[in-house]
Amino acid sequence: QASKMVMQRHHLTCAGIALALCLHHLVSAIEVPLDLPQPPTITKQSVKDYIVDPRDNIFIECEAKGNPVPIFSWTRNGKFFNVAKDPKVSMRRRSGTLVIDFHSGGRPEDYEGEYQCFARNDYGTALSSKIHLQVSKSPLWPKEKVDVIEVDEGAPLSLQCNPPPGLPSPVIFWMSSCELGQPPSLLEPWGQPLSGKTKLENFNKALRISNVSEEDSGEYFCLASNKMGSIRHTISVRVKGTSSLPCHLFYFHSQRLRDMCGRGCSGSFRCLKEGSGSCLCKWLWFCVAKRAGGRGLSSLTAPKEWRGDFGPVTTAAFLTGALVSFKAAPYWLDEPQNLILAPGEDGRLVCRANGNPKPAIQWLVNGEPIEGSPPNPSREVAGDTIVFRDTQIGSSAVYQCNASNEHGYLLANAFVSVLDVPPRILAPRNQLIRVIQNNRTRLDCPFFGSPIPTLRWFKNGQGNTLDGGNYKAHENGSLEMNMARKEDQGIYTCVATNILGKAEAQVRLEVKDPTRIVRGPEDQVVKRGSMPRLHCRVKHDPTLKLTVTWLKDDAPLYMGNRMKKEDDGLTIYGVAERDQGDYTCVASTELDKDLAKALICLVTRPTERPDRPRDLELTDLAERSVRLTWIPGDDNNSPITDYIVQFEEDRFQPGMWHNHSRYPGSVNSAILSLSPYVNYQFRVIAVNDVGSSLPSVPSERYQTNGARPEINPTGVQGAGTQKNNMEITWTPLNATQAYGPNLRYIVRWRRRDPRGSWYNETVKAPRHVVWNTPIYVPYEIKVQAENDFGRAPEPDTFIGYSGEDYPKAAPTDVRIRVLNSTAIALTWTRVHLDTIQGQLKEYRVSTTPKSHRFPGDRNRGIVSRLFPYSNYKLEMVVTNGRGDGPRSEVKEFPTPEGVPSSPRYLRIRQPNLETINLEWDHPEHPNGVLTGYNLRYQAFNGTKTGRTLVENFSPNQTKFTLQRTDPISRYRFFLRARTQVGDGEAIVEESPALLNEGMRRGHTPYWLCCGAGGAYTKNHVDIATQGWFIGLMCAIALLVLILLIVCFIKRSRGGKYPVRDNKDEHLNPEDKNVEDGSFDYSDEDNKPLPNSQTSLDGTIKQQESDDSLVDYGEGGEGQFNEDGSFIGQYTVKKDKEETEGNESSEATSPVNAIYSLA
């Protein structure tokens, strides 16, 4: 059933819209007609910061009006710019716009600078703003590498993105791919909303997650883009699972902060709970421009300085007593306007601006400082105001006001024109204004005169001035009516008068009836296939032309064959699912419009594919056509949209069905085009939105008569498979193109020479090979179809080539010029075309172990990605389709030194609280002769860091001992190798946290071993300082002491203690002695334990355990227990010998081998 009618009506009036846009211009400056003498006025200019695309020509705009027509000139970087001397620069006719043309070459960067336009005539000079021209540059990151970050679940995470600079400044946005197998999705502010724990900071340069969870794992992409291109940086985040508390987000808005934010800005105080830790509070600010053309920003952490529409912004925040101060470029408070005076009149120019700091005001006249201009007794300068008294004709000039501070400047032109002109009306005579009843309207009567005339309005020739009540007269000559009524129709006269005379004009006003929809469409719920009707009955003014249009979902409705538009409504035939939506009737005239909406919904019922069509019948049998008719099957609640007609023939491909044609679902009969010599059989398939039906039962067969072919084969090609042949191939005709029995092809060929003779061969297969051909010679080829009824029309001619042979010559005069440590420039002499013996594909350069390709016929190229400080052998070959030619003479060349790679590893050892030992290995790729090493390091404790210290070492030194000045802080080390070219890539590592208890006991020192590919830190929790552990150890020690006393008493009394039996038992890993790391060693303690593995040299191999920590930095001879105590104290001498002997012995440890693979 149809739901209750709900009409949504919107009434708009075109005249009302135009009036609303113009009301704020009612009190505007009076324009001087161009037929009167006047100084220049700048009407169009390029923006101050003008960024151009280097791929296009440059247009620096400057247009002005005046009488006489202004003459233009330019300065560049403060000096006169002679346009005539530069052939690439021209100036548009009757305009000052500069055109810099790069079609004939040139670099746009050569024209960067500061430009200023001057427009001059007999009455003064106007200036444009200083236009800073810059060429756009694309941001460019080095070759992308994926940063991998591991973070504990519940901890905060900040992902940084610092793209290189570009012009214009690149826009930064983030994408994420946190779910496995899902494509990246765009994050705010352009994509999906950020969660409450995620926010963007520092102008999108940082993505912060307050408490990381497992679903945050994945790849994050930082993209920087401007109109020149875009770049991407990838960060992979891996979350290690631990428990965490939820994150909470709070906002505290401060009215005091908003009051201090200044012009058009406000701020807020944000507290963000970092994982399970304490709250972190930050000041946030956001600006919304209040004036036209401004841009706004929102929800960004304030950096130290921001330059936008308001100039630089400096922010400072404290947890108590917030202080925010803004530095602003100048902005207008009172911009100077053109001044038109009659002889003897007084006037003034006012120039007021504000900013922080307060801008300085400077006056200029005709582009020169006013202090240096000729004295004018009628002019007086008083700061930001110029006062004119008793002006006379000849005092016309253009004045410039410059307001500037350290953050920018403003420049405004205002002319003073002294004229003696009687009144004149500038609008056309006898205007006709038509408005809609009860709408606000305005009658315009622009005028001019000097002195400024007085303007009055009269209606129908009556003597009373119209001003007050429903009327309001404005200074610019406009008469405004608050509400147009029928009785306001008539003829209005405006009269302008001054001491030199008067002028008048008439305006006729007509008030029309509004357009109204008196019966609109109703919301309806309909069945699929039904015929709903949408009403739209309109009442309008009969003198206006009415237009009724329909929209569907706010877009123009396509009127197909199922839609019927009538004078008072719309009917939809056979409604389907795609017809659901909002329908809008829009009734409009040239003055106003009205609209009404309604919603159509379909009853939801199960839908299926349609049943197959049935009862196929062939009628109207002809030579090349036949009519096929069928009866549609049930559509199963989803209307049939299409019918597909298929055919099968029993000569070429019996049993295979082919699509013949497709028809709309509203038809059940079609005339089918047929081909000669085909025994046809047809079937029909119905299609709806659910799918396709089963094919119908095939029709009876229909045989067409034969004919000669009408087309020839396509895709004719000729190419050699060997050096003395040419294989001719083509695409054969199909069953409906053969047109008759015994289809064959006449192949003809000859060398590409008009005097050559044609050869021919008749074949049935789509291929023919011509033998004994010269090497790589062009041939003309024709392939013509033929059957028993005749031949096809004359075929087109195609060009083919015989087979290729190997090139006979090598490139000569190969010259090498070294560009840098990784690239060289090559030039060579091309091989002669006669020696290529085929189609030249490329020149290939071999530099062991790589090769470099230069496609096409060329004689120069650049070979890159070479290794620095290496000797190379180079040779060249030319290649064609057959293969390589002979090799050129071998050339040898060296590459210069480059910067080295990072050292292979950096090992950090802390033997005590006073020293740190560093040990490193030489770089894997020195790329030259090493001249030394540079070590930079600094102490840090939490977020506090000390000053950076520098040490330089000789190339042979690989060890260094640092005397600690602070036993508590850790150290961060940056180690680089150096050649004569400079410092190489740094390896960066940090000293580990001290195991305090282990250090006090004198155990073997803590090691950190780091290589170029990663680091493994043996850092177990130090429980030796825990109170419960100390108490437990004391209890165990007391118990052991009691047992020893008992054993001693039993031995002294002659009792037996089964020591040997205990030694023969397997060591239980759960034994408490193992847990606390204590053993009672006897004279036989040097023997292997029952569970230990003995090597060939008699030493004890360590057990592989995930819980043990192997000192793989010094050969792996020691082993820690779970409480951090060291098991191998009794092998101190051996430890010392191995430490001094073999510094790479960790490779022999099986545990170390595992970690080196990890």
Image (cartoon, rainbow, N blue to C red):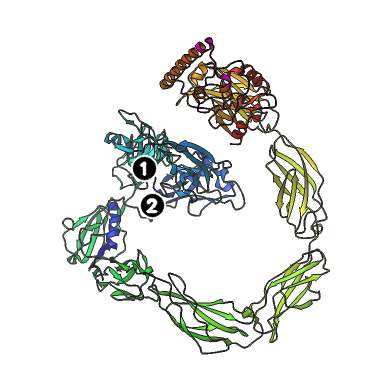
Graded by Cα atoms within 10 Å as few (under 14), some (14 to 19) or many (20 or more), the crowding at tag 2 reads: some
Q: As rendered, which of 601 and 334 lies closer to the eye?
A: 601
Q: As rendered, which of 873 and 123 lies closer to the eye?
A: 873
Q: Position of residue 248 (x, y in %)?
A: 34, 38
Q: Is residue 385 visible?
A: no
Q: Which structural element holds mark 1?
A: loop
Residue 202 falls within the magenta-colored stretch = no
Q: Which residue lies furthest to the top in this view?
A: 1052
Q: Where is residue 30 in the image (x, y as percent from the top left)?
A: 31, 52
Q: As rendered, which of 905 and 262 lies closer to the eye?
A: 905
Give the left or right position of residue 112, taking residue 488 as reference.
right
Residue 103, placed above or below residue 767: above
Numbered circle sitting on residue 37: 2
Residue 1053 falls within the magenta-colored stretch = yes
Give the left or right position of residue 886, taking residue 147 as reference.
right
Numbered circle sitting on residue 1034: none
Q: Position of residue 542 (x, y in %)?
A: 25, 74
First in sequence: mark 2 or mark 1?
A: 2
Q: Which structural element holds mark 2?
A: loop
Q: What stretch is highlighted in magenta?
A: 1049-1060
Mark 1 belongs to which amino acid?
A: Gly
- Mark 1 — residue? 196
Placement of the N terminus among the 4 image quadrants: bottom left
Mark 2 belongs to which amino acid?
A: Pro
Q: As rendered, which of 1020 and 193 lies closer to the eye?
A: 1020
Which label lies toward us, 2 or 1? 1
Residue 801, placed above or below residue 1108: below
Q: Position of residue 1119 (x, y in %)?
A: 57, 25
Q: Total label count?
A: 2
Residue at 50% across, 11% down: 1049
